[in-house]
Image (tube, helix red, strand yellow):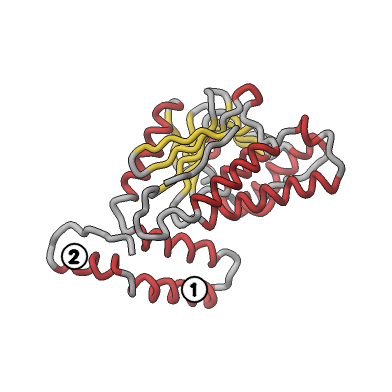
Amino acid sequence: MDLGNYETLSLQQEGPALVVTVNRPEALNALSQQVVADLGELVRRLGEVGRDGDWPVRGVVLTGAGPKSFVAGADIVEMNSMDAAAATEYGQRMHRVTQALEALPVPVIAAVNGFALGGGCELALAADFIYASANARFGQPEVNLGLVPGFGGAVRLPRRISPGLARELIYSARPIDAAEAHRVGLVNRVFDDQESLLAGAVETVKEIATKSPTAIANTKAAMEAMIGLDTAAALAVESESFHSAFTTEDSVEGRGAFVEKRKPQFPGR
């Protein structure tokens, strides 16, 4: 499995989990153009992993280097030298990264330690769900710079929390801590520190890895496709997904194991 080497990312395999660390601690892991390029290439390669049924990666844990920051946001120093066209392209490249993350056939967990502001919050929102350390801080502070969310925050934040609260946080630029993020449903679980945060995220991937990989991939794709649909259209997507899942070897094995009262051995096909 060749996932490449990256200037701004470090990769570590923890059993079935691939831990991806944005590694610019000197800049609080801000999303420079190089980080965006590296994330784009990595996600492209990850999109091909497991398609042959080997499934060497069963989940991705996305985090940031150092104790202070997950991703502090876009790289404002770089952005300040851009014109409007270049800045728009910068945002569109990040849109492609986040959409590709959502399209991966394996779950992505954002393990947020410290700051997840602006682009960092938007990157976390592209994950399937978010875990946080107690010192995590979330926010969309773009209006402080005379800007608006440019990496998907205005789209995804209202899907995770109430639309009214999303508007309040974006309009006011008010950050929220991990406890409040958990209370409003932005974060699934809060951990005491960075070490237990990463351990918890990896443990969740290990739990998921005991299930059918094709079923997880089918479910993730269907749930993404249902966003914004009315009930009838969403049920049609679910029905199609159920039909597709029923024809897999994993389904044959899973149903057979249940009837025979044994643990399934999913082939990943």
Could you tell me which residue is drawn at 66 percent across and 25 percent down?
A: 27
Mark 2 — residue? 258
| Picture layout, residue 54 above or below residue 35 | below
Query: Crowding near pointer 1: few (<14 within 10 Å), some, many (20+)?
Result: some
Residue 119 location, quadrant: top right
Q: Tag 1 or tag 2, which sits nearer the N-term?
A: 1
Of residue 108 and residue 188, the one placed in the foreground of this image is: 108
User: In this rendering, would 195 be left or right of 63?
Assistant: left
Q: Give the mark count.
A: 2
Q: Amino acid at mark 1?
A: Val
| Picture layout, residue 76 above or below residue 204 | above
Could you tell me which residue is drawn at 62 percent across and 49 percent down?
A: 97
Of residue 12 and residue 113, the one placed in the foreground of this image is: 12
SS assignment at label 2: helix
Mark 1 — residue? 237
Q: Disc 2 vs disc 1: Cβ atoms closer than 8 Å?
A: no
SS assignment at label 1: helix
Furthest toward the right, the residue is 83
| Picture layout, residue 134 above or below residue 228 | above
Of residue 138 and residue 77, the one placed in the foreground of this image is: 77
Could you tell me which residue is drawn at 79 percent across and 36 percent down?
A: 79
Residue 133: x percent and y percent?
48, 30
Residue 199: x percent and y percent?
37, 33
| Picture layout, residue 141 above or below residue 247 | above
Of residue 147 and residue 202, the one placed in the foreground of this image is: 202
User: In this rendering, would 73 be left or right of 101?
Assistant: right
User: In this rendering, would 139 be left or right of 171?
Assistant: left
Q: Amino acid at mark 2?
A: Phe
User: In this rendering, would 112 be left or right of 93?
Assistant: left
